[in-house]
Image: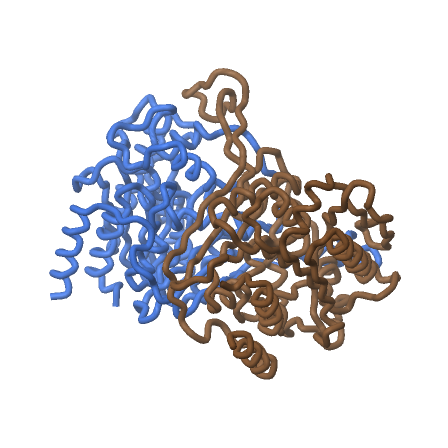
Chain colours: A brown, B blue
Amino acid sequence: MKKIILTAFLALSLITGSASAMSKSVSIADQGSFAAGGTVVQTPGALKPEEPMNPAGQTLHGDHAYVFYQKPVHAHKYPLVFLHGGGQSAKTWETTPDGRDGFQNIFLGRGYSTYLVDQPRRGRAGQGTVDGTVSASTLDQFWYAQFRLGIWPNYYEGVQFPKGEEALNQFLRQITPNTGDFDKQVISDSMTAVFEKSGDGILVSHSQGGGPGWLTAVKSNKVKAVVSFEPWDGFFFPEGEVPEAIQTSSPFGALEGTPIAMEDFLKLTKIPILVYYGDNIPDKPSKEWNGDSWHARLDMARIWVDTINRHGGDATLVHLPEIGIYGNTHFIISDLNNVQIANHMSVWMHEKGLDK
Amino acid sequence: MKKIILTAFLALSLITGSASAMSKSVSIADQGSFAAGGTVVQTPGALKPEEPMNPAGQTLHGDHAYVFYQKPVHAHKYPLVFLHGGGQSAKTWETTPDGRDGFQNIFLGRGYSTYLVDQPRRGRAGQGTVDGTVSASTLDQFWYAQFRLGIWPNYYEGVQFPKGEEALNQFLRQITPNTGDFDKQVISDSMTAVFEKSGDGILVSHSQGGGPGWLTAVKSNKVKAVVSFEPWDGFFFPEGEVPEAIQTSSPFGALEGTPIAMEDFLKLTKIPILVYYGDNIPDKPSKEWNGDSWHARLDMARIWVDTINRHGGDATLVHLPEIGIYGNTHFIISDLNNVQIANHMSVWMHEKGLDK
């Protein structure tokens, strides 16, 4: 019965489309923030209190994640733990560029506790244990293509990105730089610490968050499922089963699978996994660098999902156009149809018994 | 009558002390995030779509603030807009290092809408329009003294900082670096844009946020009051009335007042202003660099408040030990007695008619 009601609800949502921000109030039982994981480094030498800027003998806390969490009253058993992608912070999951609810509010409204992460060396978790540089290079038009809004200044036909100057302004200002090298091991270590705080939960990753996300599921037995939106790289295969690299015409070069011990790989076969890719990804190699780059990722993801399932896993790849959902950019979770996408994800979580 | 009830409530709070995190649920009518202000820069030259990492012809959006807001049901008229200090993000106002409610939850629970800002070139607003470097220098023991927890490894006697390794760990991980030069004008421009979104409101600043906070009140007529916790610098005086610089033995050198046009200065005399300083600030020049540095600031703030009032303004300086509140660090807003401090601020807001 529960499933029938849910399906009817979803059908209605598909007709009415997306709602504006928070159409009804949400009762929050608790909310707050914390740092998770990280390391402490120390400079050799004797501490000199009268020379406070002398690093000798002093320590530094860095490489932690920052997390903001909210628990609605009567929350589902499993919280959703959100890990952003490249050039982004937890903002990815908040208000959309045109002011609608992002996944934070949508799933809070559906009774899920949410944990929004800024990964180590990004956003509010900006203090790393390595020096970093931040560039003010002009790259808006690169990101525009990379995130598949279109080829500047044109949008792809039928694209699910909100039109208007202010939406694009907001979208481009979501971008926030690395404050130190991107490091999958550092990130997945901190994410493991996040799950120690959240308890058993569902990891939702985007883009560059895909790779450290799989590693988190390998490292932590508290990751009970993974939903990954357009994972960028970090496709882990058992040693000896890594497929041939896929060449691309993009500045990122060839896409390679990454070998991992069979024992670790098999951990990914013990939890349900759902992977989404959006629209405007060519179905064969393309001369346009962005399309070609994403074509390689979709192809690799298909091989990866097949490999997971061949080893007894439960992974599903949804290429949205194949189920009749068109126009999605790389930011499926904040596109105009993000309620429809959230509904699809909700149905899957229900089918897998994750919405208890 | 209303005032009497409030006072009784406060007296009770003084006895019972601080509560743990969110003792009752809060009904949120709306929440979300946005970028405010900022600029767009462009590299000269022709855009080459086939060379996506070539900055020629491309733009960059940067120097905006990032804001997360929450509106409780039946909110007071004026929201609180929070601006953090040096080496910090909006995390300053969230959960305390030992897991209690920060000012975000405390004032949300009291019916205020809250706007928590990451200033330009910090935290989730990390993309500036100038290059930056991030250092992994070991400076924990510097911050420990600078923030007046004590002189490492000792805490000041009776300090209101929560004891225990994990609280200190959380506190030190709140620190997040500049991703570009600190610039009061850039920050106050973006804060003016924040107030365009929030509407008329009360600016609450901390430490290094003091200076750009005063400038925001000069630039925006939507700032209806300012509460500033331990403003660090940016004490603006009318041209010709700047007091003598105060020398210090700290690595930050002498503290100077900053001249500003009389017309601008007078804007600060049109709104109620409340300034707090905590404990362990020497009442005369000191050989300990951190105490000496704060002694200079408290002294300068006294001169500044007198100057505001001499020109017809309504500024109040509260040096907490003078009203019998002892042990506060530089982080008055997250110290063990932060509910008591919030109560004091609530009384002031009520007296000034700011809690409508």
Q: Quadrant of the C terminus of chain B?
A: bottom left
User: Horizontal and vertical percent for residue A152?
Assistant: 75, 66
Q: Is residue A345 left or right of residue B152?
A: right
User: Horizontal and vertical percent for residue B21?
Assistant: 33, 51
The answer to whether any part of residue B191 appears in the image is yes
Q: Going 54% across and 28% down the picture, which residue do you hit?
A: A41
Q: Using the image as rendered, state which of residue A52 and residue B2 is in the foreground.
A: B2
The answer to whether any part of residue A165 appears in the image is no
Which residue, as the protein is rendered here, is positioned at the far top?
A: A46
Numbered disc total: 0
Q: Is residue B20 left or right of residue A197?
A: left
Residue B130 in the image: above or below residue B218 = above
User: Horizontal and vertical percent for residue B93?
Assistant: 39, 50
Q: Quadrant of the N terminus of chain B?
A: bottom left
Q: Is residue A202 left or right of residue B332?
A: right
Q: Going 43% across and 39% down the picture, which residue do you hit?
A: B170
User: Horizontal and vertical percent for residue A117?
Assistant: 54, 51
Quarter location, residue A232: bottom right
Residue A81 in the image: above or below residue B317 = below
Q: Going 33% across and 60% down the picture, which residue do you hit?
A: B108
Q: Going 51% across and 62% down the picture, which residue do you hit?
A: A104
Q: Using the image as rendered, state which of residue B31 and residue B275 is in the foreground.
A: B31
